[in-house]
Image (cartoon, rainbow, N blue to C red):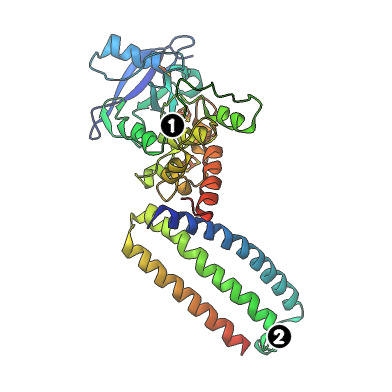
């Protein structure tokens, strides 16, 4: 990996952290607001089904996680397990794709 | 004050062990005084380094009761626990013998971090004028008093985990040059300090800043490098 790529990944991790901070706040505020009158599966689905704004926010949330987590894991793998190089990077790309895929599928599951 | 001090001193190379000595306690005694007493009066084979004894040269750093310190300016009063002292070579560097660490990698990293000044004027040109009030001069000043003692390097856990990491002192040096208005080598320097072996790996633990005997803040300089490197990468200049 070139130094420029490493640096851009670092920037991407900081930027995705900023996005995550906003998403987590909205997420927590929504939970606190929504649970006040008790919570059922039907109630949640009634709110999320067909709600474009909800789907958009959580899609952004999922994508930010898929960017943020693998880059952090890159440093953890290098510093704790000495795993560096191409095989690690490929494994992390797979990890990012799996995170994004599972997350987006979950979003679709409660939206559609 | 106890009449004597029990001192455990590292002897041998990496496979060595501590040996205990009894050293008479004196007023205003420094850790370097203790080590010198052992070498002069008890065991002349003890290897250690010092030169100036006044906190200028940066050669006397050792691990004292678990923490890296400049021994010539560290008073026994401040660090001895229950009349005991443990003195070992600096962490994160290979041990040559006893209290002498191999500093090559530490200084090679200064070179790798672009630590050399690169001017673009000759002696036929005018002197550069740098205002003492300028912001850049202030930033350079904040890091310039480094004595190269490697205390910060020894305190840094990222160096321990990533042997390629350039470390706080080399990065602090690079930062002072990034802010040197006379220097013409910054494109190469930023490239040298970018990436996973460079400033981006710093975890901002601040162990370096806490331990630096000159009260410098390599952490702050590294934060500056991170910004500079990120901007350069986004502009495609890296
Ligand atoms: S702030 Fe950075 S350079 Fe200093 S000790 Fe922590 S990780 Fe090392
Ligand atoms: S930054 Fe401080 S601790 Fe590190 S080498 Fe320089 S003087 Fe020593
Ligand atoms: S002997 Fe020179 S700094 Fe300690």
Q: Residues within 10 Å of mark 1 (few under 14, many from 20)?
A: some
Nearest the eye: A12 or A32: A12
Image point (46%, 64%), residue name: A70
Closer to viewer: mark 2 or mark 1: 1
At horizontal 43% and vertical 55% (from top left) the residue drawn is: A75
Task: State the image quarter where residue B104 is shown.
Answer: top left
Q: In the rendering, at what x and y percent does residue B53 appear?
A: 42, 13
A55 to the left or right of B196: right
Does ligand 2 reach within 8 Å of label 1's beta carbon? no
Q: Is residue A72 left or right of residue A57?
A: left
**Can see residue B178?**
yes
| Residue displayed at 42% across by 29% down | B65
Q: Helix, strand or loop at disc 1? A: loop
- Label 2 sits on a secondary structure element that is helix
Which one is in front, A40 or B189?
B189
Residue B91 seen in the figure: no
Q: Quadrant of residue A6?
A: bottom left
Mark 2 CB in 8 Å range of ligand 1?
no
Q: Give B229 or B20, whichever is nearer the viewer.
A: B229
Q: According to the image, label 1 marks what residue?
A: B118
Mark 1 belongs to chain: B
Percent x, y of residue B89: 33, 28
Q: Is residue B190 left or right of residue B220?
A: left
Which residue is disc 2 drawn over? A47
The reply to the same-chain question for discs 2 and 1 is no
Q: Percent position (x, y) of residue B235? A: 53, 54
At x 67% / y 79%, what residue is drawn? Answer: A54
């Amino acid at each position: 990996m070139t130094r420029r790529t490493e640096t851009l990944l670092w920037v991407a991790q900081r930027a995705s952290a900023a996005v995550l901070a906003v998403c987590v706040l909205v997420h927590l505020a929504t939970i606190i607001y929504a649970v006040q009158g008790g919570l059922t599966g039907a109630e949640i689905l009634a709110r999320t089904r067909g709600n474009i704004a909800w789907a958009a926010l959580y899609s952004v949330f999922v994508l930010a996680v898929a960017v943020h987590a693998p880059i952090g894991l890159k440093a953890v793998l290098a510093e704790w397990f000495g795993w560096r190089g191409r095989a690690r990077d490929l494994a992390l790309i797979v990890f990012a794709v799996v995170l994004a895929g599972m997350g987006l599928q979950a979003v679709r599951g409660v939206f559609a | 004050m106890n009449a004597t001090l029990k001192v455990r001193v590292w002897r041998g190379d990496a496979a060595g062990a501590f040996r205990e000595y009894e050293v008479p306690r004196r007023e205003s005694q420094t850790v370097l005084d203790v080590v010198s007493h052992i070498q002069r009066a008890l065991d002349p084979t003890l290897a250690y380094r010092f030169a100036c004894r006044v906190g200028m040269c940066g050669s006397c750093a050792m691990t004292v009761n678990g923490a890296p310190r400049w021994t010539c300016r560290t008073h026994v009063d401040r660090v001895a626990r229950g009349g005991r002292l443990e003195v070992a070579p600096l962490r994160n560097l290979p041990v040559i013998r006893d209290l002498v660490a191999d500093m090559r990698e530490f200084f090679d990293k200064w070179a790798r971090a672009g630590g050399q000044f690169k001017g673009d004027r000759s002696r036929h040109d005018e002197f550069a004028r740098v205002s003492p009030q300028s912001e850049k001069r202030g930033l350079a000043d904040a890091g310039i008093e480094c004595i190269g003692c490697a205390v910060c390097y020894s305190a840094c856990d990222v160096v321990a985990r990533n042997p390629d990491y350039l470390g706080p002192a080399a990065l602090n040096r690079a930062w002072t040059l990034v802010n040197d208005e006379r220097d013409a080598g910054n494109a190469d320097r930023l490239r040298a300090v970018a990436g996973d072996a460079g400033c981006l790996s710093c975890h901002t633990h601040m162990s370096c800043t806490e331990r630096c005997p000159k009260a410098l803040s390599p952490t702050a300089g590294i934060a500056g490098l991170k910004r500079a490197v990120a901007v350069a990468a986004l502009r495609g200049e890296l």
